[in-house]
Image (cartoon, rainbow, N blue to C red):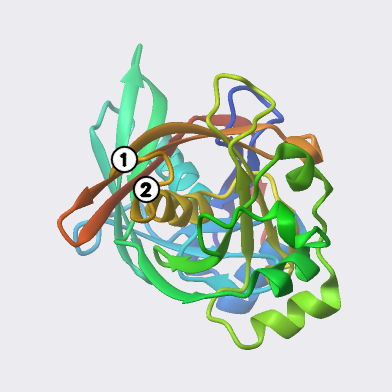
Amino acid sequence: MKDETFHILDVFAEKQYTGNQLAVVRTGKTLPDNEMQKIAREFNFSETAYIQSDKINNGGYDVRIFTPQKEVPFAGHPVLGTAYVIQKEIIKKPVKTIPINLKIGQIPVEVTMKNKKVEKLTMKQMQPTFGKTFNKNRIASVLNIRTSEIDTKFPVEEVSTGLPFIIVPIKTLSAVKKARITQEKYFELIQFTDAKAILIFCPETYNTENQLNVRTFADYYGIPEDPATGSANGCLAGYLVRHSYFGTDHINIRVEQGYEIQRPSLLFLEAKSNGEKIDVYVGGKVVETAKGILIQT
């Protein structure tokens, strides 16, 4: 069997060893599903992406994404990181858009180049859909915070742009910092929900250049806390526009995540109301930290 090349990346990172870690493996089609799952567990990052072929299929590049626990239909930072590897290793020339084929459908990634290198990547996510709302007392008990620390002006709501999340508006950074999951209550909650992960956010930030601070908990997927979550922040962008969180029907903001686990990350969120729909864009930078060969025995 052919040896596979892999890349270790930091996504939504401004420098090495920040942002969200990712392994991208090329020509993953030669690997059976159980082997891809084992490799994802071996890397033990939040997700591992597999480029199925160097050739375009149905207008895009086929990609599959695995967490250490299971395959998922969509995740944000693997899409951006995979597009980075495709441009650098497969296309090898300036390009404006890279279409990525996932289980949920095709995600176009816009590429911003600088000095013939990728400066920033931005993905247009699927149209957000909105599900059930939740009792704030119950959510507070799951997060080990007081109910009064949840912002009552906005709902706790299930949102999806391909992977659903429970979005929780918090009033202060101190409340966000002290939040921690009560495992028993968390798993009781998610057995009756489509969303299996929780995003909490507040308008107070560590960096004054940023507009929101975010934390994401995804124990169901084997990720107690994610340092930067493109899929969850896409859901957040749709939520912010739907509920006019900033008093407008459009946003163009900087979001910080991962500070509480010493992996500071930066995401760029854009969203705007388009009739009954909301267009959502999530962007960030990618930094490569290592490259190697995955030995097949």
**Mark 1 in CB contact with mark 2 (< 8 angstroms):** yes
- Packing grade of label 1 (10 A; few <14, some 14-19, many >=20) is few
**Where on the picture, by quarter, is residue 16?**
top right
Residue at the image point whose x is 69% and y is 81% from the top: 189
**Where on the picture, by quarter, is residue 104?**
bottom left
Q: Outermost residue toward the top?
A: 115
Question: Residue 271 — which label?
Answer: none
Please state which of residues 219 and 27 is positioned toward the viewer in this rendering.
219
Residue at the image point whose x is 74% and y is 65% from the top: 140
In this image, 274 relative to 117: left or right? left
Amino acid found under the numbered disc labelled 2? Ser
Residue 86 x, y percent position in the rendering: 39, 42
Whether residue 87 is situated above or below residue 220 in the rendered picture: above
Amino acid found under the numbered disc labelled 1? Thr
Whether residue 71 is situated above or below residue 12 in the rendered picture: below
Q: Can residue 50 be seen from the camera position used here?
A: yes
- Packing grade of label 2 (10 A; few <14, some 14-19, many >=20) is some
The N terminus - image quarter: bottom right
Residue at the image point whose x is 56% and y is 72% from the top: 71
Residue at the image point whose x is 55% and y is 19% from the top: 209
Please state which of residues 153 and 4 is positioned toward the viewer in this rendering.
153
Q: Can residue 297 be seen from the camera position used here?
A: no
Residue at which label 2 appears: 244
Q: Secondary structure at mark 2?
A: loop
Residue at which label 1 appears: 248
Please state which of residues 76 and 158 is positioned toward the viewer in this rendering.
158
